[in-house]
Image (cartoon, rainbow, N blue to C red):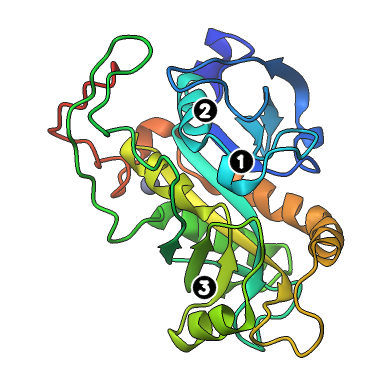
Amino acid sequence: MAIAQQHDASAADIGIIGGTGLYALVDDLAEVSVDTPYGPPSDSLFVGAFGGRRVAFLPRHGREHRIPPHRIDYRANLWALRSLGVRQVLGPCATGGLRPEYGPGTLLVPDQFVDRTSGRKQTFYDGERRSDGLLPEVVHVSAADPYCPTGRLAALKAAGAAGWEPVDGGTLVVIEGPRFSTRAESRWYGAQGWSVVGMTGHPEAVLARELGLCYTSVAVVTDLDAGVEAGEGVTHTEVLRVFAGSIDRLRGVLTGAVAGLPATEDRDCVCSHALDGLETGLGF
Ligand SMILES: [Zn+2]
């Protein structure tokens, strides 16, 4: 924190990509507009003190919630956070439960994801020259364990301390959206043993890894998905209602998780070493 303060009001070492109910908690809020070689991020970044650290909040869908999951510029979002100094990212998201026991209000910290999206720009290393003239190298990062082990532990511990007993591990299946799953799709996901379904977890996690950032997904279940729900299936209204009702508890979990993350220079996890020995050509 001391190092960040020596820089400027826009410096942060932890990023949170989440909904608009979250950034209001930042003290000394500084709205920072950032552009990137991939275009602008979803919105301004909101930087300030949170959980005793310097945190940058980014509303994933924009502050008016106008950007659907499949149109989010995930590359711009991760790049923008990194450019402020962020090296560890928490990604809270709304999900549907794929098992009867994962009902609304469940908090799950996944350890795997399955990509069922299509057509999203999902790499910084796609062999194309960027708008600033740089030509990135062809780089393949490991995604075997896509989430930061240290961040996962911090989130699990913070949830327990906040009285919100989390599910430790599980698979987040990420669908293209914006529509919800059919019952057949949902039953299929559940039959594979996957845990929850969302629309934003990919490529957010792998893009973070490609930049050497730690990324931790914090999934809030807002509904039972269509395959385990006997009623009319998932509705957007219900998702928003349950997520809004979880915001206060989620803030508590995020505050504790942020406080429990190591200092940037003390990171020693698979994410922090993802680019060791590699020439990225990304210009950092
Ligand atoms: Zn990490």
Label 3 belongs to which residue?
168
Instruction: Say what amino acid the circle numbered 3 marks.
Output: Asp
User: Upstream in the sequence, badge 2 or badge 3?
Assistant: 2
Helix, strand or loop status at disc 1: strand
Q: Quadrant of the C terminus?
A: top left
Helix, strand or loop status at disc 2: helix
On the image, the x and y values in percent for residue 148 come to 40, 53
On the image, the x and y values in percent for residue 87 come to 44, 33
Tell me if the residue at label 2 has its CB under 8 Å from ligand 1: no
User: Upstream in the sequence, badge 1 or badge 3?
Assistant: 1
Q: Is residue 21 left or right of residue 47?
A: right
Whether residue 56 appears in this view of the structure is yes
Residue occupying the point 47% across, 39% down: 88
On the image, the x and y values in percent for residue 9 come to 64, 12
Instruction: Say what amino acid the circle numbered 1 marks.
Output: Ile
Counting labels gives 3
Label 2 belongs to which residue?
81
Contact between marks 1 and 2 (CB within 8 A): the answer is yes
Q: Residues within 10 Å of mark 3 (few under 14, many from 20)?
A: some
The image shows residue 95, relative to residue 203, as above or below, that is: below
Residue occupying the point 59% across, 9% down: 8
Q: Is residue 123 left or right of residue 78?
A: left
Q: Residues within 10 Å of mark 2 (few under 14, many from 20)?
A: many
Residue occupying the point 66% across, 74% down: 165
